[in-house]
Amino acid sequence: MSYFVRFRVTWGCKGFGPRIKTSQDAVLARVEDYLRSEGTYDADGWMDEFREAFVGRGADIKVVEEEWAIGLVTFVSSGFPGVLFRARGRGEETGDAWQFECRDGKLIRESSYDGERAGVARESAPLSDWPGPLELSRVVSQAGSRSFIAEIFGGQPGGAQLAALTIKRKGGRSPRALVYVGPLDQEAFERIRDLLDDRYRVQQFRSLETLLSARTATAENPEGY
């Protein structure tokens, strides 16, 4: 049984957009170039779907992964200086949803069910501006899991990008809880997420504004934890 993702890319600026035939042709030529050179999708077999994704209302495409889509859209955007490309993907499974923006061949914004991934250039508030985290023991009940997570936190390189990590028990009424603020690489986040996946929702936030956009328990406001 195949797994499909609803994929759509919107783009344009004054005098350049998906309703202008010359713009369509130029963007789709870049898409086809990428498909033929990268090789994951057969350009002859899938070009109609990618055409709908870029100049139509979106298309259901087999197993579009976010990292692959980022490679495609950054390549396409590199050919059109100053034009903003916005991409969205939504899979068949709950939580498989992501979106990102590219300009001039660079990823400038990204978010997903997991929060905000590492490696995206963004301004970060100084560590002193972030709220304090709760003790991990107030959020995660399993001692073994806590020890594993604490070991990961303690092993983060100082040069890793600053992040906040939140944990929320699935099905519970309590809000997500901030349990860590500090350097955190993408691999470390994924290890923690995979460890707790059956019982908790784990998210990472690399901008203070996004973290504070929803109710979050902190050391200053523990929200019942």
Image (cartoon, helix red, strand yellow):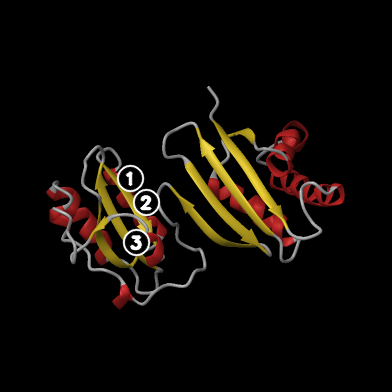
Above or below 43: residue 166: below
Q: In this figure, which residue is indicated by the disc labeled 2?
A: 190
- The amino acid at mark 1 is Asp
Name which quarter of the figure residue 39 lies in: top right
Q: Position of residue 201 (x, y in %)?
A: 30, 45
Q: On the rendered structure, is 149 left or right of 66?
A: left
Q: How many labels were placed on the picture?
A: 3
* Mark 1 neighbour class, 10 Å CA radius: few under 14, some 14 to 19, many 20 or more: few
Q: CA distance from mark 1 to mark 3?
A: 24 Å
Q: In this figure, which residue is indicated by the disc labeled 3?
A: 212
- Labelled pair 2, 3 in contact (Cβ < 8 Å): no
Q: Secondary structure at mark 2?
A: helix
Q: CA distance from mark 2 to mark 3?
A: 22 Å
- The amino acid at mark 3 is Leu
Marks 2 and 3, the one that precedes in the sequence? 2
Which residue sits at x=19%, y=49%? 145
For residue 194, the mark is 1
Q: On the rendered structure, is 37 left or right of 147?
A: right
Which residue sits at x=18%, y=53%? 146
Above or below 11: residue 40: above
Q: Position of residue 224 (x, y in %)?
A: 13, 53
- Labelled pair 2, 1 in contact (Cβ < 8 Å): yes
